[in-house]
Amino acid sequence: MFADNWKISLRQIERLLILDLFGLSSLLLPGILGKMTGADGIFCLILGMAGAGILLFLIKRTLMQIQKDYYSYLKENAGQLLGDVFMVFYLIYFISLSGFVLYQTTSLILAWLLPEGSYLWINILLLAFGGYGVIRGIEGRARVYEIIFWFLGVPLVFMLGLAVRKVNVDYWTPIVATSGGEILKGSMNVWILLLPLSTILFLRPYCKTPEKLALCGKHALITVTTINLIIYLILVGVFGHNTLQVLKRPVITLMSMINFPGGVFSSQGITMTFVWFFALFALFNTGIFQSNLLLKSMCHETQDRYSLLVVLLLILLCTGAFFENSMMTELFMTYQTWIVLPGMIGILLLLQGIVQIRKWCGRGKGGKVSCLKKVS
């Protein structure tokens, strides 16, 4: 039975958003910022949060104007053709994001859990689980991930507390020693990894109190940025600038180095890998859900049939491209920076402009006065 008609609470949505934003950003950003900025990466995290705040502000303005769902809002204000073009833009984003996240998740499994495994079969298995999560509906996902949120959060806080003992504060210097251009590039990398906030636009029909959706995004953004700041300061303090920039997954390496009091639980590196596995899988599952929702809306399907199969196949092909071509990761980040980011901001600004023009013309609330008549 499909569960698309369920409504979930703001608390559940906030937990989903935190998991979506945390996994990929905490895994990739320390290495990226370590190479670019050293200790000044903390400024990149703050500026990236400010950039995401701009996107969130535009999302909030848009949500205040949506009556039914985002697709209907697009068609009403931009027309059928342009509305479909915008939906295809979002569809490509979520499919490529899902492919990239699946690539990172599978790489994590191969590196720490199944070094002799086949990436193809791991991809297929994870896609099957992701597809099943979509079929169960957003309400089922919300319940499961609310449990996972605490399952991941408690050990993570405990492990970070143990890691603080290894911090050498001398490694936090020099500070404010990076050029403005490098800080700007680092901030852009932070911003693009926070773009999954755009999922809020599509969650209005599934939320019990949709008027407060943007508030969930705000809380999730502040929470994830705070956690990333703490993780980054610990990593710089433990490894120093030079070592941090050569580690592939610094936060996982850090977790594998931490010793529990009394020498118990020596395999914590593998155990903590599951923290990032579930966090990445949450974002991966969100990407499948959003892609399926978009394709299903454009094809006017009422159930998850052909659209879900098409989405899973496209994600599998996209993930395979990441494994087969080492340049795909750089290409993906370039696509995110120069197409997705300005595209998301541009679409929301265009919609706000159209709405304001329609209001000025007397049509924003059902008026019948034309622009020319109003001007004359």
Image (cartoon, helix red, strand yellow):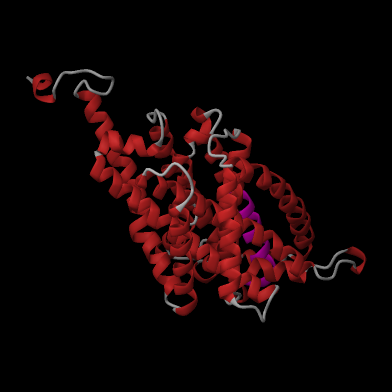
Residue 149 on image: x %, y %:
69, 48
Q: Nearer the viewer, residue 207 or 20?
A: 207
Residue 143 on image: x %, y %:
67, 42
Work out whether 167 lies above or below 298.
below
Q: Residue at x 76, y 50 (%)?
A: 154
Judged left or right of residue 296, residue 287 is right
Q: How many marks?
A: 0
Q: Residue at x 54, y 61 (%)?
A: 41
Q: Residue at x 48, y 41 (%)?
A: 200
Judged left or right of residue 66, residue 24 is right
Residue 72 on image: x %, y %:
35, 35
Residue 167 on image: x %, y %:
73, 64
Residue 241 visible in the snapshot:
no
Q: Nearer the viewer, residue 97 or 258?
A: 97
Q: Residue furthest left?
A: 376
Q: Residue furthest right?
A: 262
Query: Quadrant of the rendered structure where residue 24 is?
Result: bottom right
Q: Nearer the viewer, residue 305 or 29?
A: 305
Secondary structure mostly seen in magenta is: helix
The C terminus appears in which quarter of the rendering? top left
Q: Can residue 27 be found in the magenta stretch?
A: no
Q: Which residues are magenta?
A: 225-240
The N terminus appears in which quarter of the rendering? top right
Work out whether 71 lies above or below 159.
above
Q: Can residue 236 be found in the magenta stretch?
A: yes
